[in-house]
Image: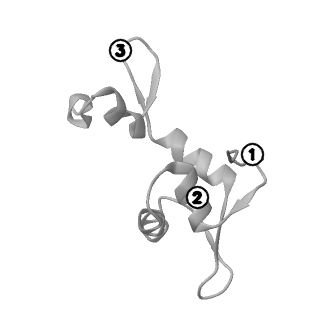
Amino acid sequence: MTRDPVYSIESVLTVHETAQLLRVSQRTIRRWIADGRLPASRLTNRVIRIYYHDIVALMDSCRIALDDGEQLHSYEMNTVGIDASDFES
């Protein structure tokens, strides 16, 4: 049984590690970087690194407020059966 890695706020992750952490595809991570949603550092043409604190900031920006004041991440909406259009004005 493998254990999930533990990251500190100073950790630097690869695109692959970031995708695994957020449970999305590497293509999604690369799209978020290209769109400017997720800051990253391109060390060479093929080497990209992402600071863990930038991943946390992205997750915080995706929180959705519920009526009872509880916070729900947008990535959790499908898990609990909430449609994003429920929150649009």
Disc 3 marks a residue whose amino acid type is Asp
Contact between marks 3 and 1 (CB within 8 A): the answer is no
Instruction: Mark 3: give few (<14), some (14-19) or many (20+) Cα within 10 Å.
Output: few
Give the labeled residue for mark 2: 18
- Where is residue 4? Give x, y as percent: 67, 46
Label 2, secondary structure: give it.
helix
Disc 1 marks a residue whose amino acid type is Val
Give the labeled residue for mark 3: 67
Q: Report which quarter residue 64 is drawn in.
A: top left
Residue sitting farthest toward the top: 68
Contact between marks 2 and 1 (CB within 8 A): the answer is no
Q: Say which residue appears at 46% left-offset and 18% top-offset.
A: 70
Residue sitting farthest toward the front: 1
Asked if 43 appears above or below 26 in the picture, the reply is below
Q: Is residue 57 left or right of residue 70?
A: right
Asked if 56 appears above or below 34 in the picture, the reply is above
How far is mark 3 from mark 1, CA to CA? 33 Å
- Where is residue 68? Give x, y as percent: 40, 11
Residue 6 badge: 1
Name which of mark 2 and mark 1 comes first in the sequence: 1
